Amino acid sequence: MFYFEVFSQQLITGLSNGMIIALIAIGYTMVYGIIELINFAHGDVFMLGAFLALTLLGALGMEAWGPSGQVFGVALMLIGSAVFCGGLNWSLDRLAYRALRKSSKLSLLVSAIGCSFVCMNLGLFWGGAPMKVFANGNSAAAPKNFPAIIPQINLLGDGFLRITPADLLVFTVTIPLMVGLTFMVKRTRLGRAMRAVAQDPTAASLMGIPVDRVIGATFFIGGALGGFASVIYSLYNNTIGFQMGTRAGLDAFTAAVLGGIGSLPGAVLGGLTIGCVRSMSDQYLETRWTNTIVFCILVLILIFRPNGLLGSTRREKV
């Protein structure tokens, strides 16, 4: 019975972390699906969203708002970070990527890597800001404590199995976002335009679809999902840092490839898979082997399914 309870607890932890990874992975897969670009700056946009959330929390003194006020504070951080990250991702497309769309894919890739370093250094600068909320160590590079404004209680009482309000927040926010995104892509005018541009941007343009605006909207939506994920991650882990985007971005990119890059359900499946594998590996094996196990699984799946678990073969446009 004890082993079942331990397994169940690690499964809950893995699913919670996996949902966060999946939200970030969707941003990767949306952009790749429409312009075939691996936006390596996406993880660092996620990181900047976490820094904005911490800034809002400290500047507005949310820790003293009380339970009902803190619920409003969490909603404010979610919306603020989503808008900020969406706008930042849109700006990267507008300023760095749009002019290179007709260039080689290598040029776009190098531009994305450059944007990643710019965003990472912006996070390093932000972390050194003279604010009380950032006063965790003398170095700008020091990890920052994210106040636990969500109660750390067990919703199941005194039992061994532990489900906290933070776990509940993860599923309460991520599941509606994923359902809403799926509905938007499949049922709305913007979603149909996205699918048309992904299939053939030239034909879509000839049909009157504003291709640049659709691509910009895709970047905004992907960035906004990263903003939501940054707040959930911060409240769940209570620590942020300027390098967090590298780790989260690598996990999310791996999840997108594992599930089938360009596939929204694949990104979700990949995120959940990686979250659970990491959780189980940390519990039953040594933590140092976790990354090795994750990438071994990725390699094995790509050997037998080169397009990922739910990916489909993309026909080259000529």
Image (cartoon, rainbow, N blue to C red):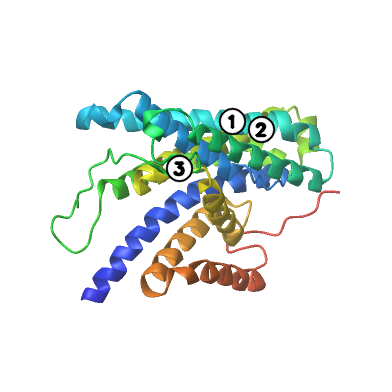
Give the residue type that dot 3 points to. Answer: Ala
**Would residue 139 appear left or right of 162 to someone viewing this image?**
right
Q: Which mark is residue 251?
A: none
Horizontal and vertical percent position of residue 281: 42, 70
Contact between marks 2 and 1 (CB within 8 A): the answer is: yes
The answer to whether 253 appears left or right of 241 in the picture is right
Q: Is residue 147 left or right of residue 250?
A: left
The image shows a total of numbered marks equal to 3
Marker disc for residue 92: 2
Name the residue: 45% across, 41% down.
230
Please tell me in which quadrant of the rendered image residue 250 appears. bottom right
Element under disc 1? helix
- The residue lying toward the viewer, choosing from 214 and 154, is 154
Counting residues from the start of the chain, the first of labels 2 and 3 encountered is 2
The location of residue 212, given as percent across then percent down, is 72, 29
> In the rendered image, which residue does mark 1 sit on?
88
Q: Give 209 or 72, whichever is nearer the viewer.
A: 72
- How packed mark 1 is, by other alpha carbons closer than 10 Å (few <14, some 14-19, many 20 or more), is many
Type of amino acid under label 2: Leu
Q: Residue furthest right?
A: 318
Q: Which residue is mark 3?
A: 229
